[in-house]
Image: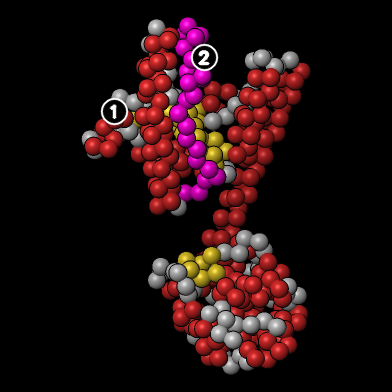
Amino acid sequence: MKNEVVDWYIKSRPTYKRLADKVESLLSEVFEMEGISYHIITSRAKTIESVRGKVSKDKYDNPKEQIQDFAGIRIITYVEDEVQKICEVVERCFDIDFSNSSNKSDDLGLDKVGYKSVHYVASLDKSRLELPEYKQYNGKCFEIQIRTILQHAWAEIEHDRNYKFTGKLPPDIGRRFKLLAGVLEMADREFNNISNDIDMISEDTSESTKKGDLDIPLSSTTLTQFISTRFSSISEKGIKFVPDKSGTLIGEMERFGLSTLDDFNKIIPTDYEEQLLLTSDDNELNEYGVVRRALIINDYDKYFSVANIDIDKFSAWSSRAFENREQKFFDHYGVNWDDIYEKYSVTLLSQ
């Protein structure tokens, strides 16, 4: 029977591979539509060698039915709260076999540390299986694993070391692994708490911006939320603000002499939002363009001489962002770009 199962799987494996790919694609689309963040999704069909090893252990009466991870999907998140959001999506999108699904954290109990992950045994729902392209997956299940980056790191290391120790670690090393799992669990929770604190700062900044209370220190988080809220009419037109994730802008603004959102808001021209709309491209506005234009309009000599700009990098940025309409933009605010070019060798594409 063992060889029969392996022969069956050799023929069936391409179908399970397609199933795993389909589920990965479906989840990616839902996460994008619902704005759910995650680190990575991977999928695979079990290797033939792995199936051969499983069926040789004599623990299955009916391997075709009892092995439930011929197709597998793994979702790695950044923080623990994302795990819960993704679990809600999985339970909503697929038929879940809860009797064979598990949360490994619950299995550990209160007094143990170790492997943590959520495992679902699932199948496509009835409405999807009625579609012609999905009928081939009728009667086939798959496993979905969900865990954080730190949980994944610990699990992968433990699995690899256990393999090298032929399935069992020496007691002292095993204990050290368990202690490390506890440290990583604490770190996981702290990362989650920090993430929530940042979200709270973002929400507070949005509310304060709406109220006009802008005595808020500059940071990448507060700046991004301020721009999104302050120029909400731009967002409402479907134009996305691309954030500066490097922190470069904050350094430039501080060297320019700004320390709060109020300082920045005071140098923004009254018709700035309207003019920004004229320069948007591909339904995107980069935070670099939003901030740097305002600083240049306010005092370009101060910006280029005090803000400590890397002119080579700035020129590269300019050559991508400044098209012919940029000349009109700066002309509108009385900025003499010929003077800027003569002093700082920064050009516009139109020149």
Q: Position of residue 171 (x, y in %)?
A: 74, 15
Which residue shows up at 44% across the image and 73% down it?
234
Residue type of the residue flagged with mark 2: Gly
> Is 111 situated above or below 323?
above
Q: Earlier in the sequence, mark 1 or mark 2?
A: 2
Q: Which residue is mark 1?
A: 138
Quarter occupied by residue 269: bottom right
Frontmost residue, 55 versus 271: 55
Residue at horizontal 41 percent and vertical 67 percent from the top: 238
- Which is nearer the eye, 55 or 197? 55
Residue 215 drawn above or below residue 7 = below
Residue 57 forms part of the magenta stretch? yes
Q: Where is residue 185, by image quadrant?
A: top right
Q: Is residue 211 left or right of residue 6?
A: right
Residue 326 part of the magenta segment: no
Label 1 crowding class (10 Å Cα cut-off): few <14, some 14-19, many 20+?
Answer: some
- Residue 120 in view in this figure: no
Determine whether the residue tagged by mark 1 lies in a helix, strand or loop.
Answer: loop
Residue 53 image label: 2
Circle 2 residues within 10 Å: few <14, some 14–19, many ≥20: few
From the viewer's perspective, is 93 left or right of 50?
left
Magenta part of the chain: 36-59
